[in-house]
Amino acid sequence: MKKITQILVLLIAVFSNAQKFENLAQTPPQGWNSWNTFGTDINETLVKGIADKFIELGLKDAGYQYIVLDDGWMAKERDGNGNLVADPEKFPNGMKHLADYIHSKGLKFGLYNCAGATTCAGYPGSRGHEYQDAQTYASWDIDYLKYDWCDTGKINAESAYTTMRDALYKAGRPVVFSICEWGDNEPWKWAKDVGHLWRVTGDIINCWDCEVGHGSWSSSGVWKIINMRKEIRKSAGPGHWNDFDMMEVGNGMTNAEDRSHFAMWSMLASPLIMGNDLRTASKETIKTLSNKEVINVNQDKLGIQGFRFTNENNMEIWIKPLDNNQWALTFVNMSNHPLDFVFDWKNHDIGDDVNGRYVDMIKNTFQIRDLFNHKNLGDTSTNLKARIEPHDVLMVTLNK
């Protein structure tokens, strides 16, 4: 039955000439989403304030462009014609007004909905209204759609997401399509031609390596998220990304943990979607989030997802190949005490079997750049020596 469904989905796409919008999200999207901090407690004043902070704090200049309203923006009921409408108390001027305000800042605007009959918070979902809702989003000049997976019963995920993809395409306004079915249906195997990014896990929570239960489901900390999926990195690339969820930087972890979190999302080529309150963010939080040297690793045009190189003695080392024969390496102290370490470049074969990229560290010498401290650390002709504080990170690039 599953094979028949997949064939039908393919035939419908072929004969309808529908597709996802190409040339979008050629690097992982950067932006902000309301859910991690505000849940459904969102309103027009909040969103305008966040847009203003993008400019004031230099986040737009650092590449962030999407402001995405998550669940709870719509009224509890559709109007008499079956159209979605904005909650009149939260958004008295409507979504088109808000989109215009965000666009006036040179930013882009996104909304949330769900493949089920209702959203995860109980608002109207898009099931049975996909084409109608897509037309509504186009009329509001929406640039990004996060599409969730609650109240879906026994419907087929690939088919449901393909239907919304086709609806968005027919509506005619280019939209980044964010698939959010939590990795339950292995979207990395089928979503490349459906969406621009897809969640690979359930919801993140603001802790280092914990799991918090919510009855029939649970939220996972940063390292639980990182370790949840195996063998998916080959699915990522320009226009189609593994999404490890919105970031928790600035939401209660230590500054060191925030740096490690941000470094890892950049190494993993995950979308960099902020989830904190930018209006009250500390200087250290903004310093981390706006670090262009780290962001450049995330935005590298090769679009290769990094991978774990070693995991020994409480030190994880991750590698990511970059354009122009450069490499990024991230050293993470997983322990609760400072670690002094020495890394002998000539004793390690730096390479990526999946993408066929290798470098002979004996024959080649690279300059070493410390991305968080913005300084050069010599070159690979001598051993790298460093002290890393608990749950902190040393992130470097190797440049010829």
Image (cartoon, rainbow, N blue to C red):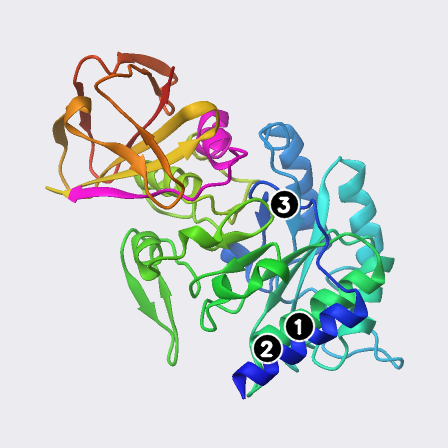
Q: CA distance from mark 1 to mark 2?
A: 6 Å
Nearer to me, 159 or 219? 159
Image location of residue 293, percent across then percent down? 46, 25
Label 1–label 2 contact, CB within 8 A: yes
Nearer to the camera, 249 or 47: 249
- Residue 251, can we see it? yes
**Is 351 displayed left or right of 6 in the figure?**
left
- Estimate how packed mark 3 is, as few (under 14), some (14 to 19) or many (20 or more) residues with alpha carbons within 10 Å: many
Q: Amino acid at mark 3?
A: Ala
Residue at image coords 63%, 62%: 194
| In this view, 69 is above or below 40 | above
Q: Residue 389 or 396: which is nearer the viewer?
A: 396
Q: Which badge, 3 or 2, is on the more N-terminal residue?
A: 2
Q: Give residue 266's quadrant in the image.
A: top left
Tell me the residue that label 2 is attached to.
6
In the image, what residue occupies the spot 85% across and 78% down? 79
> Mark 3 and mark 1: span between their CA atoms?
23 Å
The quadrant the C terminus occupies is top left
| Residue located beneath label 3 in the image | 25
CA–CA distance between discs 3 and 2? 25 Å
Point out the stretch of residues depicted in magenta.
Answer: 286-311
Q: Position of residue 300 (x, y in %)?
A: 51, 33
Location of residue 320 in the rendering, given as x and y in whole percent from the top left corner: 37, 36
**Callout 1 crowding tier (Cα within 10 Å): few <14, some 14–19, many ≥20:** few
Amino acid on which the number 1 mark rests in the picture: Leu
The residue wearing badge 1 is 10
Left or right of 144: which side holds 131?
Answer: right
Mark 3 element type: loop
